[in-house]
Image: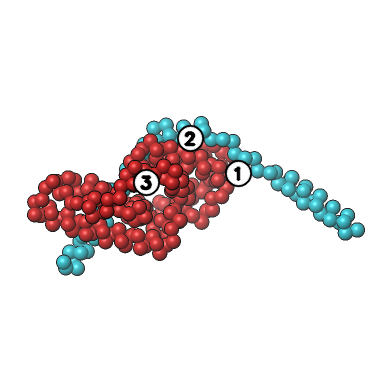
Chain colours: A cyan, B red
Amino acid sequence: MSLDREDQDDDLLTKLLRDTAPDPVPDEGFADAIMTRLPPRRPRPHRAVWLGAGFRHWVSSLAIAR
Amino acid sequence: VVPEVESRLDLALVKRVLLHEDRQAFNQLVRRHQSNVRAQLRRLCRDDNARADDLAQETFLLAWRKLSQFRSEAQFSTWLFRIAHNCFLQAYRQQPMHEVQDETPFEQATGPRPSAGLQRDLQKALQALPEGERVVMLYHAQMGLSHQETADITGLPLGTVKTHATRASARLRQWLKDYQSNENSGVTT
């Protein structure tokens, strides 16, 4: 088989593979169904709580140092 | 340019979910990506659409829970495909797809049938590839993702992805050659 023929086959195969890509799927209520199943997101600890905890740790470490 | 705009829009929506607990923003993300994720899973599940849609629901629920783990260096779509792929692998380990248990070698399973449509037969030839090659061809050749993106989604090393792609292409080229020569000689089934 000539190189040209091989190249043509490669091009055809590439095109055929792209043409067999999965078809788009219509939503048909899928997104709404997901939304009804979403649990509440876990609340993230408030930054002030972290700062407060860090401050308390710092104060107690000073007390130990004394 | 368009994918970059799409990617930025995804990122903006993710930020809104994370910063403001914005459910509408997540709804937008689901609507934007449900088609690709469901199509991906339908192919992985060999057109068992009900099972694929169950896995797609699981994928988006996991995405909601793990959204803070999303790193913006990757495309949001690639991150979702990876979650979907992992959901598929987990389900597949628990209950393999019945066709996957068929151990018929590629060459025997895909005898050229010129009387049938070329695309339909190619689809069958793809389904008969060894599992690793089939998955790589789905992401790389059919969905048009790069080798690196395919590696990111499947968790396979980049070298393995390239090897699978090369081997699968060689098999399919041979398959196409046989198909064409049978068609030219007028073989029918």
Crowding at dot 1, Cα within 10 Å, few <14 / some 14-19 / many 20+, comes out as few
Q: CA distance from mark 3 to mark 2?
A: 21 Å
| Badge 3 and badge 2 both on one subunit | no
- Asked whether the beta carbons under mark 3 and mark 2 sit within 8 Å of each other, the answer is no
Q: Residue B121 versus residue B106: which sits nearer the camera?
A: B106
Q: Is residue B28 left or right of residue B141?
A: right
Q: CA distance from mark 1 to mark 3?
A: 34 Å
Secondary structure, mark 2, is helix
Asked whether the viewer can see residue B28, the reply is no
Q: Residue A54 versus residue B86: which sits nearer the camera?
A: B86
Residue B155 placement (x, y as % from top left) = 45, 56
Chain under label 2? A
Q: Is residue A52 left or right of residue B81?
A: right
Which label is found at residue B44? 3
Q: Is residue A2 above or below residue B22?
A: below
Task: Report which residue position mark 2 lands on.
Answer: A34
Which label is found at residue A60? none
Question: Which of labels 2 and 1 is toward the front?
Answer: 2
Residue type at tag 3 = Leu
Chain under label 1? B
Crowding at dot 3, Cα within 10 Å, few <14 / some 14-19 / many 20+, comes out as many
Residue type at tag 2 = Ile
- Asked whether the beta carbons under mark 1 and mark 3 sit within 8 Å of each other, the answer is no
Crowding at dot 2, Cα within 10 Å, few <14 / some 14-19 / many 20+, comes out as some
Secondary structure, mark 1, is helix
Residue B173 is drawn in which quadrant? bottom left
Q: Residue B122 versus residue B129: which sits nearer the camera?
A: B129
Task: Report which residue position mark 1 lands on.
Answer: B19
- Work out whether mark 1 precedes mark 3 in sequence or the reverse, and give the earlier one: 1
Asked whether the viewer can see residue B121, the reply is yes
